[in-house]
Amino acid sequence: MSHAAAPAVQHGDNYINHTPGIKSWLGTLDHKRIGMMYLFTIMIFFLLGGIFALGIRLELFSPGLQYMTQDTYNRFFTYHGAIMVFMVIIPLIPAAIGNFVLPMMLGAKDVAFPRWNLFSYYIYICGALLASSTLFLKGVDTGWTFYTPYSIRSSSSATYVLLGAFIMGFSSILTGLNFIVTIHKLRAPGLHWDRLPLFVWALYATSVIQVLATPVLAITLLLLVLERTLGIGIFDPKLGGDPVLFQHFFWFYSHPAVYIMVLPGMGVISEIIPVFSRKPIFGYKAIAAATFGIALVSFIVWGHHLFVSGQSEFANMVFSLITMFVAIPTGVKVFGWVATMYKGSLRFNTPLLYVFGFLFVFTIGGLTGVFLATIAIDVHLTDTYFVIAHFHYVMVGGTIMAFLGGLHYWFPKFSGKMYHETPAKIGAFFVMVGFNVTFFPQFIVGVLGMPRRYADYLPQFTVYNRISTIGSWILAVGFIVTAWNLWRSLKNGEKAGDNPWGGLTLEWQTASPPPFENFLYDPVVTEGPYEYRGDKVYLGKNA
Amino acid sequence: MIRLLLGLFEMNKNALAATVPVAATDVAVSWDNLYWFLVYISLFFFVGIILAMIIFAVKYRKDVHKKPKYIHGHTGLEIVWTVIPTFLVLWIFWWGWVVYKDMIHAPADAMEVHVVGKQWLWQFVYKNGTSSIGDLYVPVNKPVKLIMSSEDVIHSMFIPNFRVKQDVVPGMYTSVWFETKIPGIHQIFCTEYCGTSHSGMLGRVIALTPDQWRDWVSGKKIDVDSLPADPTYPGFRSNHLGEGMPASQGTLTTGLSLAEKGKALTQSKGCVACHSVDGSRLVGPSYKGIFGEDVKLEGGKVVKVDENYIRRSIENPQAEIVEGYPPSMPVYKGLVTEEEIIAITEYIKSLK
């Protein structure tokens, strides 16, 4: 991006060893340390959510009940969903990678409000611990969607999970607000809006959704807590309330939240492709605009979750029509990414392999989204395993693959070490195969009619469930290999150097790991983020 | 060679057909047409995108293509891949809407059956006063409309062979309709999570031939085990799964039709003291001829008298007072059961 940025190499001093001791980490205001703290915390919850997922798949290996009672199974899928959505995928890329990378991409020393940043981390911890504490109480069995009136009557500890999610919402709002202000106020000289890296655009759009939509979830969850504790009668039909109103409130947040989960992943993909193709991104403005197009449309499509809820025919028509328009900007992005590779000079490092995986899987996720947007088709498919497969193709196939790609891409920047390439590729291979083996059969069994949230199923569904369960083990192996490799690389990885990939964005123009305030000299930006000119040779010994 | 290819195609077609439930209604057939259209168009885009990716990956890998080309985009191409998908999704939306309208608008002559969802069973209540649990008895080749409500939490009525699904919500009525062409068993699933035994809350549509239907209506017991199995799930013949509440197979006849029960209820609960059944004006509006009509409320709003309006007027009468009448009816919420509301509604319907 900029050649004016002076490489910052003051020997030895970096954000990791700047101040010693665990206390200096827990009280740090450094966005890089906070990002890493988020990363490790979220990975713990990812492991926990993953264990629940393996439990679900194990129980579904055969029809009938083998290892769990129905109530246990219902708790397993509730925890899997709630943990993965609220504690993992929503904060994953923005709060962990974004926290670290965003200010550096802007050429800033930190985010605009470092204290808020740390505060939001502790809010997240409080909410997550409160929600998880129910594991030792009566558990929760409402499903992560908390549909009323079941969630009102459920004798489980749902109240604490609701309060936990309510609290975590504030963390999300604060992070979003912090990022918006940071992007507006702390850009380096010369970093005009049309020179912003696409990851920054993605985080910007995400932050806008976080700030605008999360309060709606917060008040909805609070109303449900009041309904459970005081019986205020807003959602409970026995008291004259409307249970479907809850679904409207819930999805008014939770549909935009889908884009909170996937837009940052798209941003990561937009960073990796140009660097590993050595080419400017194809249609920069179109991709940036598509990001905002998706964010905008995301607010007015919630009703497509309610096609069979008893919502009016007219509302169904309008929501189906608007939902179709999500496909357009999404298509623009996918086509742009593929076109970026055209006449590039591709380097098959692990981040690019994850991009290939992302494109493969996300395209399926996106196209099956069109099935569900089509009202008549949705009537048969909704609340079956088809929907489960669809959103895992988007959330896991999209967000988690992009996250893993980004994690490998920025690993040398985070740690100063290069990860071991071969085991990383083996891990990526297992993730890709395991993912598809797990979730593809779910499309078919869903079309055949297997409903979601079933502890037990008809014998006709067995073969699909078996394949899916075996896939979950392959996927687990992929995650374990990847985690083990990255952990090992932290200890004995080669020194990465400042810019191992030859990246042009600002975070690569300083030391790895970066010094305390990121840059020793204030960087100045003179051109766009992906100006790879074919005749020039770029740094990057690893790519 | 050609024969071999055709043979493979046939095999493939059968294999593909096995990935969707058997289509037992006309709506299911039009659903299938749209579904396969979506599958093929998705395959087209998927293969195109992935093929381009693979070709670029092979052709432009670093080893053989050292000097990347300095390209920022191509406006024409970007317009093409924005505009073509736009028209395509609009077309898909329209097709989906057309099929959906057939799916939800029951023919006027549809046979009505009331459904009550409860944790964790389905209860079906017929006009003649019969009710059955777990099994829904219907004639083939006749449209059937289900008018559904729930006694506790939200359930969802899903019949894969008919491609219909509708949430069953406490406090309101929703409906689905179908006209099955295949006699025998069709599986019902509950598809809205409803607690412990959600996965056990199955049911069966028992579609009877005209002869069998006459037998059933006249009170003869039908030997369900001898009927054809569900063509999508052959080998599974039950209306519940695992533990949970066992569902009764038979039918219970009480001797009174729903409308007759309703009539008795309107007398025992005192409704007819204020609501006449002959069109004359008492304290409240007469029941006669009111069903299906539009009435004007205090405040000017006009509502259609349907199942939902009658239900609301029983449970919470003050909310929607008909213009010109005093707001004097007491609240009956909690004092009448689901089945009683159904019976009263059927009685009002019968007063043409």
Image (tube, rainbow, N blue to C red):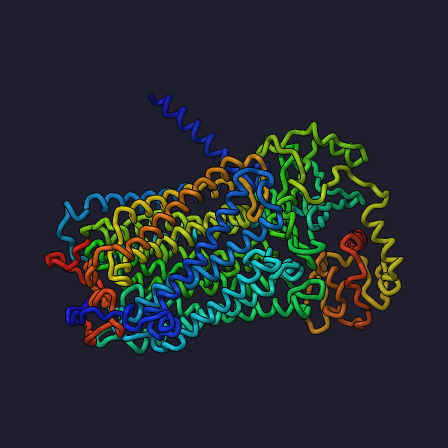
| Residue A338 in view (yes/no) | no
Location of residue A405 by image quarter: bottom left
Q: Nearer the viewer, residue B299 or A167?
A: A167
Q: Residue furthest left?
A: A535
Residue in view at x 78 percent, y 36 percent: B217
The x and y percentages for residue A525 are: 20, 72
Location of residue A2 by image quarter: bottom left
Location of residue A417 by image quarter: bottom left
Residue in view at x 15 percent, y 69 percent: A3
Q: Is residue A154 left or right of residue A279?
A: right
A413 to A448, vertically: above or below:
below
Q: Residue furthest front?
A: A21
Quadrant (top left/top right/bottom left/bottom right) for the N terminus of chain A: bottom left
B181 to A541, vertically: above or below:
above
The x and y percentages for residue B5 are: 36, 25
Q: Is residue B349 left or right of residue A220?
A: right
Q: Nearer the viewer, residue A288 or B126?
A: A288
Q: How many marks?
A: 0
Q: Nearer the viewer, residue B5 or A9?
A: A9
The x and y percentages for residue B324 are: 78, 72
Q: Is residue A32 left or right of residue A365?
A: left
Residue in view at x 31 percent, y 64 percent: A199
| Residue A405 in view (yes/no) | yes
Q: Nearer the viewer, residue A293 or A468?
A: A468
The x and y percentages for residue A412 are: 25, 59
